Amino acid sequence: MDEKELLRASIEKLTAEKRRRIEEKIAKGLAVRRGPIVVGVPDPEVDYSAVYMDDKGREVYPPEDCAVIVTGVPRAGPDDQALANLLKYGIESPHRQAPLTRGCSSAQDETE
């Protein structure tokens, strides 16, 4: 077994052990999995996969398959900080792009 295969096998083994321990905690009621977080734009300063403690003292883990759903539609209020952080890092935010008008009905389209 070469070095890459050994490394890959070790990572797979550690990942499986981590998953087993989390599932064991969930089975004992010491931890729970939350649903995915839905945001308009991703915030580069937020770790959406972070584990935290809930008000009952349980560890809260993100879902394994999808921790965040990004709609691409920023909402006033909830996404204000995320938009500010995107600009701080020089990342173009989706709301600054030109609106998509193709296929939309308008009075001008009806006259043509």
Image (cartoon, rainbow, N blue to C red):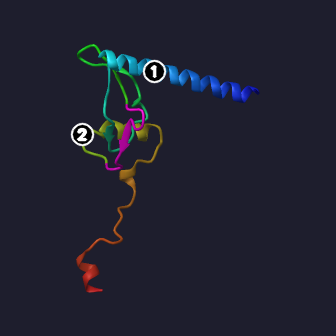
* Horizontal relation, residue 20 to residue 33: left or right: right
| Residue sitting nearer the eye, 61 or 1 | 1
Residue at 51% across, 20% down = 17
Q: Amino acid at mark 1?
A: Arg
Residue at the spot x=70%, y=25% of the render? 6
Q: CA distance from mark 1 to mark 2?
A: 39 Å
> Is 80 placed left or right of 10 in the picture?
left
Q: Is residue 23 magenta?
A: no
Residue 102 tag number: none
**Numbered marks: total:** 2
Q: What residue span does the magenta drawing correspond to?
A: 63-73
The spot of residue 12 in percent (x, y) is 58, 27
Residue named by callout 2: 77
Q: Classify residue 2 by image quadrant.
A: top right
Describe the element under mark 1 as helix, strand or loop: helix
Q: Nearer the viewer, residue 88 or 107?
A: 107
Badge 2 density bin: few <14, some 14–19, many ≥20, Cα 10 Å: few
As rendered, which of 20 and 68 lies closer to the eye? 20
Q: Write the residue at 52% across / 24% down.
A: 16
Is residue 71 part of the magenta span, yes or no? yes
Residue 79 image offset from top left, x and y in percent: 30, 40
Query: As shown in the figure, which amino acid type bears the numbered disc 2?
Result: Gly
* 17 left or right of 66 in image: right
Q: Is residue 14 above or below residue 97?
A: above
Secondary structure beneath dot 2 equals: loop
Disc 1 versus disc 2: nearer the observer: 1
**Comes first in the chain, label 1 or label 2:** 1
Disc 1 + disc 2, Cβ < 8 Å: no
Give x and y (percent) for residue 22.
41, 20
Res. 20 mark = 1
